[in-house]
Amino acid sequence: MTALDFPEASAETFAARRRRVLERVGEGVMVLPAAPVQYSSRDTERPYAPDRELYYLTGLIEPGTVAVLVGGDEPEVVLFVRERDRDAELWAGPRPGPEGVAERVSVDACHPLTELSERLPDLLARGDTLHYRLGRRDAVEDMILGALATARRRGPRRGTGPRGILDPGQILDELRLRKDATEIEALRRACAVTVDGHRAGAAAIAPGVGEWVVEAAVEGAFRRAGATGPAFDTIVGSGENACVLHYVRNGDVIGEGDLVLIDAGAEVGWYHGDVTRTLPASGSFSQRQRRVYDLVESARQAAIAAVRPGATIRAVHEAAVRTLVSGLVDLGVLDGRVDDVIEEGTHVRYFPHQTSHWLGLDVHDPGDYARNGEPRALEEGMVFTVEPGLYFPPDADDEAGREYAGIGIRIEDDVAVTASGCEVLTAALPTAAADVEALVTRATTP
Ligand code: GLY
Ligand code: MN
Ligand code: MN
């Protein structure tokens, strides 16, 4: 293990995940190619990030790999891997080659990638369905489609061959939705590093400081703590910039009375944190800012209180919405009965996004939020964000909205469903207004 490696799932855990796929794939065949290598400056390899599905099933971070999982009476997992290449390894680092991969991943066979086109038709012909994500439009996809055509041509004579193509997510999204113990541990670690970065970012905040300086503090702390980098482009939005949901320019200077919204997460061992805090640049909220802040914080608490097995993501969202709407009515921003406002959706102007998304190997992790028209019931091991917010457009044309115009506040935590409720993975980073003020002032006062 090198200094920046983090412990990951055991070989047996990866093998158990492959067995679960083989059980679900029936008589089908699943093909998972590795993510392509990305380049910048025309020919310079970017740090390699694995395809999440292939990683989930093998732990491999090896470009060029293709995994073939054959279901049925004699299930088989076959890997195709780039061969060793002294010249290429000089520039881009060592490759394990098929032998090296076979030592680490207990599959039925591990062949050189050069044998893929020859072996693939026979492997595909063993299934009635091909589980493959169309759309790569590259040489591997051409090979897979060619092999599919060959397998189907032979089908009438052999009586076998795939008849349909399904997205692998149909099986894998469901498995990835319920995190196992290793994954929960990986997420705890990513969240702990994320919290470190936020503390460093809060400490860098002061009037007159560039948003980019806060971004650098956050991301510097991520890297120091062993993150591969940010999970997504870090958002540091001061003043009205906080009302732009995916503001990433981070190019303005923080003003005296501004709020500063930091939405940032660390990627650690390919798992992610995703946290937002909104802090006062001066170290104390104005009364106007504090009213909105406390309301968003109440919504966060109400939403988290709704997380438990058997509840639904929709119920979590509804808890946030109800709290926000009732507070906005109290503040005089919205008019009418809470139920009527929710029914009419007037509040969406101020809270335009959902409260949650799944979190894991992807920041916006896959998985259906509803099934057969019904909101999905939460189960132990599901991990998601809770991120209510209120954004008052700077150019509000109504009197009620004008009082708070230009204020944008989001508070985002990450939670894992437990047997009886939930674990807030990011609880180490405070959310109460006074504690958030202290994150800024403790850093600037002796
Ligand atoms: N940072 C992106 C999100 O919160 O979904
Ligand atoms: Mn976020
Ligand atoms: Mn999020």
Image (spheres, rainbow, N blue to C red):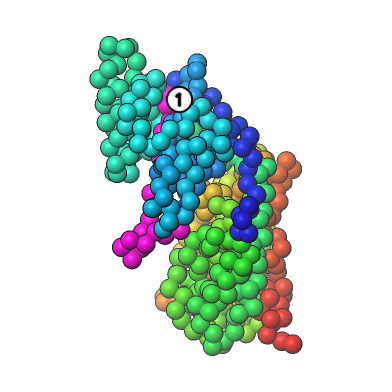
In the depicted structure, whether residue 55 falls above or below residue 249: above
Which of the two residues, 278 or 248, is positioned nearer the viewer here? 248
Residue bearing the label numbered 1:
70
Please state the horizontal and vertical placement of residue 64, each as a whole percent of the image: 40, 44
Answer whether residue 79 is magenta in the image.
Answer: no
Query: Is disc 1 surrounded by few (<14), some (14 to 19) or many (20+) residues within 10 Å?
Result: many
Whether residue 36 appears in magenta in the rendering, the answer is yes
Dividing the image into 4 quarters, which one contains the C terminus?
bottom right
Q: Residue at x 56, y 32 (%)?
A: 106
Mark 1 element type: strand
Residue placed most toward the observer, 179 or 340: 179
Q: Is residue 259 left or right of residue 426?
A: left
For the point 33% across and 44% down, which residue is it? Answer: 136
Instruction: Where is residue 159? Give x, y as percent.
Output: 32, 12
From the top left corner, tell me how far across and down residue 390 is, in percent: 54, 67
Q: Residue at x 63, y 52 (%)?
A: 1
- In this orientation, does residue 319 appear? no
| Region of the chain picked out in magenta, as a range | 28-48
Relative depth, front residue between 330 and 204: 204
Q: Residue at x 68, y 76 (%)?
A: 439
Total marks in image: 1
Write down the quadrant of residue 291 in the picture.
bottom right
Res 271 visible? yes
Q: Quadrant of residue 197?
A: bottom right
- On screen, 136 above or below 267? above
Question: Residue 207, relative to residue 129: is it above or below?
Answer: below
User: Which amino acid, mark 1?
Assistant: Val
Residue 193, percent across and down?
Answer: 64, 62
